[in-house]
Every structure is written in structure tokens, then in C-alpha cells.
Image (cartoon, helix red, strand yellow):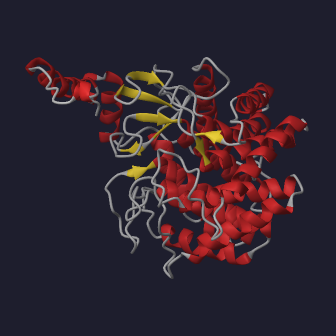
Amino acid sequence: MTSAHAGFQPSPVARLQAPLGRWLRRIRAHPLLNPTALAEVSREWLGGYPADPEHEPHLVAAIDWLVRAHDATPDGGISRAFSLVWHPYFACRGWQPSYPETTGYIIPTLYAAARRLRRPDLAARAERAARWEIAIQLTTGAVRGGVIGEPESPAVFNTGQVILGWLAAFEETGHGSFADAARRAAHYLVAMLDGDGHWRRGNSRFARADATLYNARTAWALAEAGVRLDDHKFTGAAGHSLRAAAALQAPNGWLPHCCLSDPDRPLLHTLAYTIGGLIEGGRVLGDPRLLRAAERTAGALMAAVRADGWMPGRYRPDWSPAVGWSCLTGQAQMANNWIRLAEITGDSRWLEPVPVVLRFLKRTQNRRSREPGVRGGIKGAWPVGGAYGAYEVLNWATKFFADALMRHEAIQTHGRGAASAVSVLA
């Protein structure tokens, strides 16, 4: 504090204004004062929305929501979320700014939906999003953390997620600019990796630096870059990181240090990220040890699925529920993870929880709302006020839901060995 400010005391009016402002913000964000939020809460009390036995109506609604989220921003990115109430961080209700991280991994979903729904406009959107990601890539090769409009800061995890989008765009179009962007990003990830295989430098300022085991999904992206861009340095670093993550696993499948904010009670969302990284990294690298590690955790979570498809949003190290709300993103991710395990291992038991989980997710999807930001999207939590994406419809929850529907539909129609419209990069 400089001498010019030493001893400064705010006036009585100023001392009253701060708590009054906080109180007014809480009131403004209360769901009772937001009819759209209140309608969602009321519907939950009635048991949710109708679930169509066919996947396509739910898929179309989810993809149309992603299209509206894309159109809601002034740039080529996809809106992070739609807030049903006044959001204190963004200081608004409605559509939020573009989110580089999730826009990156939505790109493969749009390409898949373009094939499945025979909509070339979706492929054009995917390419536009991938080019936008190049335009905002940092000079280091990194992808920024947070949303557009916040101060630029590199984020290792976000960089891995956008690599997946660039690799998908390269696979679809053959344009070398996407390969070049992915290569720059992969070099950045290798440079940031510590000697023991963990990423401690360059992690998002929005996450705890000591709890990022979910960077296993980043390592998977790096492995994909190594294979697709023919660079053994990338695959070597990826394998080192994935093996370091697997080495921390407990005998019951528990994964430590794996949460954005509370590693002692991690989110299903970040646990599912880690499982997915081990699955796909094991596939790419041909390492059965990584797949076995993924199976241990995925198997433990199978036991957490309730008869109606609900799963707790956080867990304790003995796999007991830590909260009474569901993380819908994590449930959609786990449906994808179980499907991928069935496809890769040939073991159909992994498909057992998928139908009931997808049915539960369908019941949370409002396909009738007059509010474009609500209609067709997937919310952060069930109930909607749960402590993950509270009163928000999230683009990444909607993305993983769409992926799971397309993957499961392919199995239902053509069997477990059938090719899905969804790339392994999704």
C-alpha cells in the first residue's frame, strides 16, 4: 500500500454499499425471480420431461442447441453456456461468451452430426470454429483459459482439448493449417510436462494446480497428435504422462488429485475425463495397462448407477456418494466411456448401464421451451440448482450427450462392432 492510501477509511455510505450490492446480486440471481429457472425447477418436481425411446429426436434437439450457441456469439466460437438466472460472474442472464476449450472438442461432434443427420452446414460450422481457434492461438502454441473477454492466460488442459478439434478438422478437410496448429500446441504441451510425467506448469488459473490428474485427457490428445502427425516425441511424452497418472490409482480404482476444486470429493465430470484419457490413450499407444486402469475406475462407477439412471455428482475415496445432486456432464461422459470400453475390449457388459443413464439424461432435456437457450440443451446439474453449472445449460454437457446418443444408436442399429458417425476424437 502506498503512503497516499495509508490510513484511508471508507465512508459509512461506502461501507454499506458493498454488502448491499452483494445482497442485491443474490436477490437478482434467485430462481424465484427468474420464470425460466422456476419452470425448470417445477418440472423437476414432476419427474422431468418425456424421454423418446428413439435417440434421434433428442440428438436433433441437442445439435440445434449447439447451433444456437454458435450463433449467439460475435466470433467463430461457441457460447460457454446459457444462464437461466442472472450470473454473478458474467453479470448477465442468457448467453455467455465463447469458450475456446469446449469449442475445440465440440468440433468433432459437429462433424459427426453432419454425417449422421446429413447436414453439411454442421461441417461448415466445425471448420469455421477450427479456424477461429487458430486465429486466437497464443504465440507459445497454447490455448487460453477461460472465455473470450478475460485476460489471456495459457492452459494446458484447454490446449489438449483444442488439439482434438484441430486433428478432426485436419482429418475431415486435409488442410495443413489445422495440422500446423495442432503441432504447435503439442510442442507447448511437451515443453510444459515435468520430468515425472505430470503437468504442473501452465495449468488454468481457474483450477487447483495440485489436482489436475484429469490431464490424462490432455495426454490422450498429445498421443493422437503424435500418431497422426508422425512425431514420436509427442507419443513418448503422452505415454509417460498417462503411465504416471495410472500409477497413482488405488486398488479400488480411485483416482486422486482429480478435481477442479475439491480433490477429496472429485466431480464425476473430472473423473470421467481421466477415465476417457486412459481409455483412448491406451488404445492409441497400444498399452493394455492403461485400459485396465480405466476399467477399474469405470467398473467402480457402474455400481453407482441408480435404477432410474441417476448418479451422484461427487464421490469419496470409498466410492460413496458425497452429494445429493447429479453432474449431468459426467453422466453423459460416462455413457461415452462405457460404450468405448465395449467397442475396444469387445466386452458387452460395459453397455449395461448405458440405456438407463441415457434415459435419465433424456428426462432432463427440455425440448419444448420457448427460450432458445434452454430448448434442447443439457443443464449442469439435476436438480438444476446443484453445485455444478447451477442454473446453466452447458455446451460441453450438450456435446457429450449428443456423442453418447450417436454412439449408442450405432450399436443398437448395427451391433457393437459397427462404425459410428462419431470420430474417436470426440
Of residues 42 and 230, which is closer to you in this image? 230
Quadrant, the N terminus: top left
Q: Position of residue 142 (x, y in %)?
A: 68, 43
Instruction: Check the image and name the residue furthest to the front.
Output: 3
> Which residue: 57% across, 53% down?
333
> Which residue: 72% across, 57% down?
190
Q: Position of residue 356 (x, y in %)?
A: 51, 56
Q: Is residue 179 visible?
A: yes
Instruction: Check the image and name the residue furthest to the left.
Output: 12
> Which residue: 42% across, 34% down?
392
The correct choice, above or below, for 348 with respect to 79 in the image is: below
Left or right of 65? Residue 5 is left
The correct choice, above or below, for 147 with respect to 405 in the image is: above
Of residues 411 and 329, which is closer to you in this image? 329
Q: Position of residue 177 (x, y in %)?
A: 86, 35
Left or right of 11? Residue 210 is right
> Which residue: 46% across, 19% down?
370
